[in-house]
Image: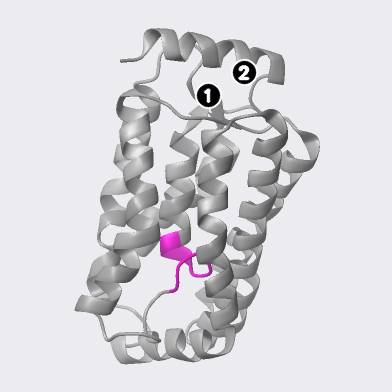
């Protein structure tokens, strides 16, 4: 059992969205730019993507989870810390320049990654408005946890080379936390979270050669570029 009701939960979204609707509009406007950075891959564009994604994780963690959800449950502070930590990790990779190289892919990773981007950016808000209580009492794209996690996982699947496990830990954990809470709180657009975690792991495990998940900080940029060429040659 959760320490709050469905009505109390969606009331938090309503209060949050009424104040920060400009941030949601900015997140929607940012989404096509992030996709464009994937479609025209380079190390510089990947660093820019990581930095922009980091801002969304930091904002969601500090503002939504730390200042709004925490009013319903002290667990909000824990989740705020996790999201802020993920944001700092993403920002660190952007500054360091050794993070994932985002690029179009074929195969299972490419299909699932593109599907998650479309779902998080378009279908997710549509389902919330059609099957939920309606705006503003719904999770906002890019500035609330569940759609942000789905969009992030989609981006991570569209990478050449390896994605560090340190970057995947919090998003994958949230697929369990948010997915299970979605059933208890009757948030239908979040139900896909429970399936997205195992699907993500399966897609990364299916990668051949230099692709997949590593427990370290990834591979050197030069190796990523060579791996990218092999991926396009070997994947359907």
Q: Does the magenta stretch include residue 145?
A: yes
Report the label total. Answer: 2
Q: Does the magenta stretch include residue 151?
A: no
Range covered by the magenta-colored residues: 140-147
Disc 2: which residue: 224
Q: Is residue 221 above or below residue 33?
A: above
Q: In this view, does 27 lie above or below 47?
A: below
Whether residue 38 is visible to the viewer of this picture, yes or no, is: yes
Disc 1: which residue: 160
Q: In which quarter of the image is the N terminus?
A: bottom left
* CA gap, disc 2 and disc 1: 6 Å
Task: Name the residue at 72% across, 48% down.
Answer: 91
Report the front residue among 210 and 115.
Answer: 115
Task: Name the residue at 75% across, 44% down.
Answer: 92
Q: In this view, does 102 lie to the left or right of 110?
A: right
Residue 194 coordinates in the image, percent (x, y)? 28, 53
Tag 2 secondary structure: helix
Report the front residue among 35 and 205.
Answer: 35
Q: Is residue 44 left or right of residue 6?
A: right
């Amino acid at each position: 059992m959760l320490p709050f009701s469905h009505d109390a939960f969606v009331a938090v979204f309503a209060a949050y969205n009424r104040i920060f609707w400009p941030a949601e509009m900015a997140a929607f406007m940012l989404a096509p730019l992030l996709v464009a950075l994937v479609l025209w891959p380079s190390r510089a564009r990947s660093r820019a993507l990581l930095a922009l994604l980091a801002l969304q994780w930091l904002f969601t963690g500090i503002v939504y989870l730390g200042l709004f959800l925490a009013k319903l449950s002290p667990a909000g502070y824990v989740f705020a810390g996790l999201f802020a930590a993920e944001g700092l990790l993403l920002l660190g990779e952007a500054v360091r320049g050794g993070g994932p190289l985002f690029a179009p892919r074929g195969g299972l990773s490419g299909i699932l990654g593109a599907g998650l981007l479309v779902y998080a950016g378009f279908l997710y808000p549509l389902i919330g408005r059609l099957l939920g209580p309606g705006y503003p009492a719904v999770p906002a794209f890019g500035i609330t946890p569940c759609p942000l996690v789905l969009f992030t996982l989609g981006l991570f699947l569209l990478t050449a080379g390896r994605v560090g496990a340190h970057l995947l830990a919090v998003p994958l954990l949230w697929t369990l936390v948010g997915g299970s809470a979605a059933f208890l709180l009757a948030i239908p657009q979040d139900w896909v979270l429970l399936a997205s975690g195992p699907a993500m792991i399966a897609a990364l495990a299916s990668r051949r050669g230099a692709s997949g998940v590593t427990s370290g900080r990834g591979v050197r940029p030069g190796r990523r570029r060579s791996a990218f060429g092999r991926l396009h040659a070997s994947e359907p």
